[in-house]
Image (tube, rainbow, N blue to C red):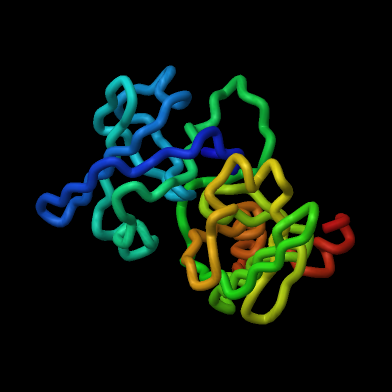
Amino acid sequence: MFTGIVEEIGTIKNIRTQQSVKTLDIACHCILEDMHIGDSISVNGACLTVIDFHSNYFSVQVIKGTENKTYLSNIKLNDEVNLERAMAGNGRFGGHFVLGHVDEVGTISQVNETPNSRIVTIKAPSHTIKQMVKQGSITVDGVSLTVFDLRSNSFDIHLIPETRRSTILSSKKIGDNVHLETDVLFKYVENIVKSKDSDLTIDKLKAFGF
């Protein structure tokens, strides 16, 4: 479980592939402090497992199934990535519930700069858009953000200066891909509402204040 609050920007320092399994060596500093083999690390929003670590980098493996669901198959040497350790039981919950399971790969279709923010429009499949609500939570490349505007095939996020400073989203440009994970709480409610055995309806949810 993650929160979508990026702890550090890492750098891809080595990529090697053996028997269809890709191993990434990621240089970083602060998240190595209490790292153990087997730990879960969010790498641009994809939950990966630590298989090795040293004083200035750690290694994770990307299997074919993860490559097919993400853009990690296209990652290159010296690319920067957003990093977050799994949430500690005694940690402060600053973002929202993030599983690190990428739902879809979106594409940046427009970028508008303002004095106080960077407005990014992301194109996404319609079924992913249907799992979003305006002012709801969305994870973009592992970053917990708010859906500021929503259309049939795209949505907008606003990046404040701190988000731009502490994540790789400041360097993303038109045509770049991003990992998307919609709010897991929305998915659970959606599944219950669609269930034939459930008596929970949209009208009841509205009556309860949802």
Q: At which x and y percent is residue 190?
A: 64, 64
Residue at x 25%, y 33% (from the top left corner)? 51
Image check: 120 left or right of 85? right
For the point 44% across and 46% down, which residue is it?
81
Residue 199 visible (yes or no): no
**Farthest residue in the left direction?**
19
Q: Quadrant of residue 10?
A: top left
Residue found 83% across the figure and 69% down from its top: 203
Give the position of the C terminus as an image quadrant: bottom right
In this picture, residue 178 sits left or right of residue 74: right
Q: Position of residue 108 (x, y in %)?
A: 56, 69
Which is nearer the eye, 203 or 83? 83
Residue drawn at x 54%, y 30% is 87
Question: Is residue 115 something that shows in the picture?
Answer: yes
Residue that sits furthest to the bottom in the current view: 152
The x, y position of residue 31, in whole percent, is: 45, 26
